[in-house]
Image: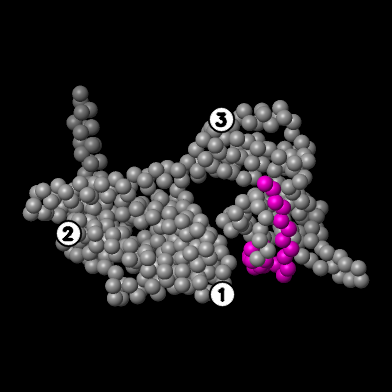
Amino acid sequence: MNNKPGEIRFIRIVRLFLERRFNLHIEKADEKEVITSIRKNTEFKGANLWTLIFAIFIASIGLNVNATAVIIGAMLISPLMGPIMGIGLGLGIFDIELLKKGGRNLLIATVISIATSTLYFWITPLHEAQSELLARTTPSVWDVFIAFFGGLAGIVATTRKEKSNVIPGVAIATALMPPLCTAGFGLASGNIFYFLGALYLYFINSVFICLGTFLIIRLLRFKKHQYENPRYRRKVVRYILLIVFITVVPSIYLTLRIVEKSIFENNAQKFVRENFDFRNTQVVNRSFSYQPRNSVIDLLLIGAELTDSAVQAIQAKMPAYHLPYTRLIVRQGLNARQEIDFSQIKASILQDVFRNDSATASANAANIREPAMPDITDELKALVAGFRYYAASPMLFRQPGKTIPDTVMVVMLGTGRPLPVAEKIKLESWIKSRLAADSVSLVLQVRK
């Protein structure tokens, strides 16, 4: 009983500390000024529209030449945050006119952005999809979190008396501009998967920035827009709640799917890493395919063959790695030999040697040097339909009458379908540029 006054005093001190430190009403700007500012930035005409077009051209060039600094500069210039925050504010204060204005201007800005980037990628002589561009074709769970927390930071900064550099930082972090440029690239190149994937990422970013804005506006208790006609007010409230439901519920579902896929891939990587570590058997290729009730882990092995009982014993461990409804495919022996080549074996062995004992490898294999090449697996997966695996290694080609052999980068590509000649030539040119090789020989292996 004697401790009660002390406990109450401690709770009050903690509560006072939290209120002073985390009170968003401190230094809060006048509500009318905030609303006027956001309403003004929601409009897309005149200087705002031209700024958007110029920013799109800059971002498209940056994606085209794989220049990260240029892309960041374009995101700083872009005024796309305006209408998205306008929609969030409109939802937060039940202002149907601001909501309509924000939605209309966001649609106009989106269409103009895609049209501008499509025009650029249609006339540019550089048609290869670079890594910066490919990164914007598939959203990840981190994109969702970045957009949500970016939206929270953006609206908090907007509601302050003293403006800071938060808004430019949010524009860079949430990356609204690159997905629109990637959608334009998809249209210009006729790749519908790029177009839809980029729009999906743009939609996710926009929705969660808007959601962050809505939550802070309600937390700050901005006054709701007043309507003289109570009947019309109830109608507006119903419309807004319906819009929130239609927008947020599907985005939450899609986000959960992204989270599930990320968790599955992490668990699958851990499962393979911990259970296929053998002295005489090597995993030379792995692929993960996620479906809610039909996921697949596909492994290609070389070396000493694992017995069926060994494979079954490993498969029995899958539930411990939270891999339900997952099928394990292990290809080895004759099946594996039909799908790999010696360059794959060489690359895999050298990678293992350098990882375990780089000093010994340097001493014992002084004349063997694996070139420093970028991993283009994800890029090839996005570029080639039915992509299974690839291997790349420089090889010496000797010809009669020539004392000095030619060195050619040989790339073995496993696909699920034959490639047209024109597509193979373009792909060969892209690989040559991407791997910085003097010459490339592309060998296709088609497996149905």
Asked which secondary structure carries label 3, the reply is: helix
Quadrant of the image occupied by residue 117? bottom left
Quadrant of the image occupied by residue 158? bottom left
Front of the two marks 3 and 2: 3
Towards the viewer: 299 or 242: 242
Instruction: Residue 29 in the image: state x and y as whole percent.
Output: 19, 61
Front of the two marks 3 and 1: 1
Residue placed under numbered mark 3 in the picture: 319
Which of the image's four quarters has the N terminus?
top left
Amino acid carrying mark 2 in the image: Glu
Q: Residue furthest left?
A: 228
> Measuring 77% from the left and 45% from the top, which residue is drawn there?
337
Question: Is residue 317 inside the magenta stretch?
Answer: no
Front of the two marks 2 and 1: 1
Instruction: Residue 143 in the image: state x and y as whole percent.
Output: 43, 53
Instruction: Residue 160 in the image: state x and y as whole percent.
Output: 24, 60
Asked which secondary structure carries label 2, the reply is: helix
> Measuring 58% from the left and 67% from the top, which residue is drawn there?
128
Left or right: residue 267 compared with residue 78: right
Q: Residue furthest right?
A: 401
Residue placed under numbered mark 2 in the picture: 31
Instruction: Residue 252 in the image: state x and y as whole percent.
Output: 37, 44
How many marks overall?
Answer: 3
Instruction: Answer with mark 2 or mark 1, whichever residue precedes in sequence.
Output: 2
Question: Is residue 432 inside the magenta stretch?
Answer: yes
Residue placed under numbered mark 1 in the picture: 125
Do callouts 2 and 1 mark residues in contact (Cβ within 8 Å)?
A: no
Seen in the picture, residue 69 relative to 310 is either above or below; the reply is: below
Question: What separation in Å lies between label 2 and label 1 (alpha carbons)?
Answer: 50 Å
Q: Residue furthest top?
A: 1
> Measuring 53% from the left and 69% from the top, which residue is drawn there?
64
The part of the chain drawn in magenta is 423-448
